[in-house]
Amino acid sequence: MMNIKNQLLIVLCLLITLQTQAQHSYMQQLHVINKQIAAAYLHHDTAGLLRIYADKAVSMPEYHLTLFGKKAIGNYLRKWMDSARVDSYSRQTYDITKAGDYLVETGTFSNKFSLRKKAIDYEGKYLNIWQMKPGGGLQLISEITGSTKDLERADLPLSTLQIPDTTLLPKPKADQTRITIQSLDDQVAELVVQRRGKDFAKYYTTDAIYMPYYMPMEIGKAAIDAYYREHEDPNTKIDAVHIGASRIIDVANYVLVDGYYKVDWRGGSTHGSITGKNISVWKRDGNGHLLLFRQMAVHD
């Protein structure tokens, strides 16, 4: 008779096999969707592109205010398509994580287009949250995109600077998860004000991915720690930071957050404010504490 240890080993092997098969299936689905997205951009097919979005989708384009809902996203995409001529477009999934009935996807894209007779080479990365439908399909519920290198505002369509009125943004329901997320955001904001980049790493999982603006992905806690230490400018003083959430989805061991931020800064005789948005995926550790697992931020 097979002993308990061997039985457990067989069960574990079966679970690993099933997880691997599921991961491969999700990767195939996203490969097909990414090809559909590329074709839609190349043919200026706004209707085709809109089919991937959920009705309550949230989109966070670089150098633009957050778009709430499929109608707002559609208006933006139509104007974007009318402004630029896309010459080539491609997307590549980097990794996928299943969080309950959602998939967290990170990836990169290349969008070469012409804007006002200027050729733009828009190389970037993205973080997507997909909702898994009962029939097995996927709908995009949250997305954020941004460049992997320095990018002028004028190089993107519809990029006139606008400052969001945060009082008008949606608010998550008031519950313990929202209180916990706001507390963590407040802690991070205080570290930014105090210029304590060396203390940021403790908020991330070992296998975290952080996607800062104008840079490629920072993969793993060690790389994220080095990033924060290197990019902390001692000549710039931060007067105030506010980080907030517009939507929170608490599912399985993850908390998926659509957010926004404002940073008031001073450097010598110059001062100003920067606003932006972010998607943060928090993951519970063995003790139930939330740590940042995936995160990306871009400017408005």
Image (cartoon, grey):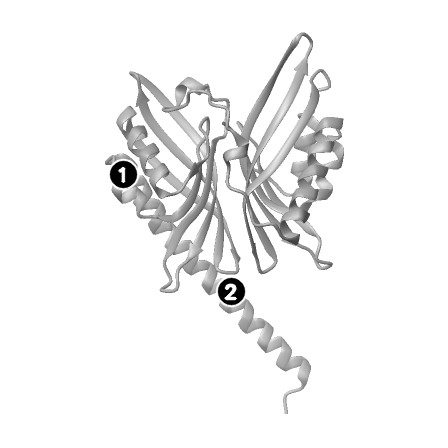
The residue wearing badge 1 is 46
As helix, strand or loop, the secondary structure at mark 1 comes to helix
Q: Quadrant of residue 38?
A: top left
Q: Amino acid at mark 1?
A: Thr
Dot 2 amino acid type = Gln
Callout 1: few (<14), some (14-19), or many (20+) C-alpha neighbours within 10 Å? many
Q: Is residue 210 left or right of residue 26?
A: right
Query: Distance of mark 1 from mark 2, alpha carbons?
Result: 35 Å
Position of 115 relative to 222 (above/below) = above
Q: Give the residue pinned by disc 2.
A: 19
Which quarter of the image is occupied by the N terminus?
bottom right
Q: Earlier in the sequence, mark 1 or mark 2?
A: 2
- Horizontal side, residue 215 vs residue 62: left or right: right
User: Which SS class for mark 2?
Assistant: helix
Q: Residue at x 25, y 35 (%)?
A: 44
Find residue 175 and report its horizontal and vertical position in percent: 63, 53
User: Which image quadrant is residue 48 in?
Assistant: top left
